[in-house]
Structure formats: structure tokens, C-alpha cells
Amino acid sequence: MHNYKYLQDTYIFNYESKILEIGEYNELKYLVLEDTIFYPQGGGQEADKGFITQGKTKINIVDTRKIDDKILHFTEDSLEKIDTNKEITMQIDKENRILNARLHTAGHLLSNIIETETKLTPTKGHQYQSGSYVECEGDINEINSKLDLLNQRLQENLNKDLKITVTKDKNTKYRSIQIGNYKAVGCGGTHVKSLIEIGEINIRKIKNKKGKIKVSYSISQTST
């Protein structure tokens, strides 16, 4: 059984687990663990960075992906000294995790506001540190005309520090996130527990690419 601790708590940065499998995939070595705090890349969010230790052995995790319902922790290091009968300790990069969570929650808030204040329909989110955006369908002229309003709503909601609620259905395992009274949406990513942690959100650019409207945004370098 795999337990994805990152779904339960964004703020778990180290954890002990057992090794279920060691293998190789696309010329990279990997470990599969019984429990993991490493978020696998997907859903518009980057994978966590960090390392795994066992005694004096340290394994750097360079990527994490979910493949065939398994989370593979990839490394370029040798796994010869790893004992599958002993527990390992995981540690993720705290600053990297929180930055990804801030970007992800900011994207959800921006999508909520766009959907509420315009006739555009958000269809996709991309919350990478190299560039974050919300992709929408609709008329770019409308969103351009309401840019000041969108920025105003962003600031108002950040100032109110709206409650962030994450729920998971016990039967279907469906997980959703809801910010304030905005519509709840399905999500398997990490989120901050408070909007105030995001800091500032700035809409950087709006452009139409192949019929899709991309609303690019950035957040302040450090949270408040």
C-alpha cells in the first residue's frame, strides 16, 4: 500500500519509510517507498527536490514521477549500499516545496476570480517556477478590459486571507480544494494553508496562443 503524505500535509518535510522496490526506468535508477512525502511532477506542478538517507548513505532525488500507480523516486546515485530491509529517511527541500505550494494556490485563486468576474472558462493551470499561467477559453478583449478589476479582486482576497479547505471523499478518494466561497475544484497538488502565505500576486501578461488565452502571473519572492 502506498501512502502519499504530501496529500495529507504540505508541511511534512521529513519522514521515515520502508523500501518496496528498487529498479531502473529509462536509464535512471529509482526507489518505490511505502510512504512518500515527495510530490511527483504532474497536474501543472513541479516535483519536489530532496534526498533519502540510510545511515551514512545519502541518495539525491533528482526527479519524482507517478508511473503505473507507483511513485518512482529517481536518482543518478548508486543504490548498491541501500539495504532494502532497513528504513530510510526522506527529506525534501522546504523552500522549494513552499514556493511550489504558493504558486499552486495562487493559480487556483486567479482561476476562481477569472471564472467569477468574466465570461472566460479556465481550463488548465501551469504552476512552474520558470513561468506560471492559467489557460482559459473565451474573448481576450474581455479579460483585457477587466484587468484592473481582476487585480483588485486578487488584492482584496489576499487581504481577507480567505480560508483554504481541502477535502477528500473516503469512498471515491476524490480530493478537492476550495478557497473561501469560490467553487471547489478537484486537485491532487500541494497548497499553502493560508492565502497570506502567497504574498503578492501579479498578472504579468495576457496573450492568445492558438486559440487559448494564457494569463501569466508571478508571486512575490518571499511570503509575508
Image (cartoon, rainbow, N blue to C red):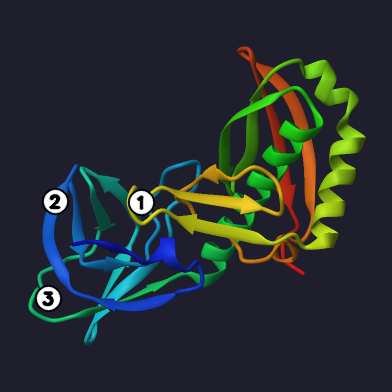
Q: Are marks 3 and 1 in contact (CB under 8 Å)?
A: no
Q: Quadrant of the C terminus?
A: bottom right
Label 1 to label 2, Cα distance in Å? 30 Å
Mark 3 surroundings within 10 Å by alpha-carbon count, few (fewer than 14), some (14 through 19), many (20 or more): few
Determine which residue is flagged by label 3.
81
Determine which residue is flagged by label 1.
173
Q: Could you tell which of marks 2 and 3 lies nearer the N-terminus?
A: 2
Residue displayed at 10% across by 70% down: 80
Q: Secondary structure at mark 2?
A: strand
Single out the mark in the foreground, 1 or 2: 1
Where is 221 relative to 215, above or below? below
Label 3 to label 1, Cα distance in Å? 37 Å
**Quarter-wise, where is residue 31 in the image?**
bottom left
Residue type, mark 2 in image: Glu
Determine which residue is flagged by label 2.
24
Residue type, mark 3 in image: Lys
Residue 118 location (% of width, % of height): 79, 27
Is 133 left, or right, of 157 in this rendering? left
Mark 1 surroundings within 10 Å by alpha-carbon count, few (fewer than 14), some (14 through 19), many (20 or more): few
For residue 49, say whether it is visible: no
Residue type, mark 1 in image: Lys
Q: Could you tell which of marks 1 and 2 lies nearer the N-terminus?
A: 2
Find the residue positioned furthest to the top: 211
For residue 217, say whether it is visible: yes
Residue 96 location (% of width, % of height): 53, 63
Q: Are marks 2 and 3 in contact (CB under 8 Å)?
A: no
Residue displayed at 70% across by 40% down: 112
Mark 2 surroundings within 10 Å by alpha-carbon count, few (fewer than 14), some (14 through 19), many (20 or more): few
Q: Could you tell which of marks 3 and 1 lies nearer the N-terminus?
A: 3
**Quarter-wise, where is residue 76 in the image?**
bottom left
Residue displayed at 74% across by 59% down: 162
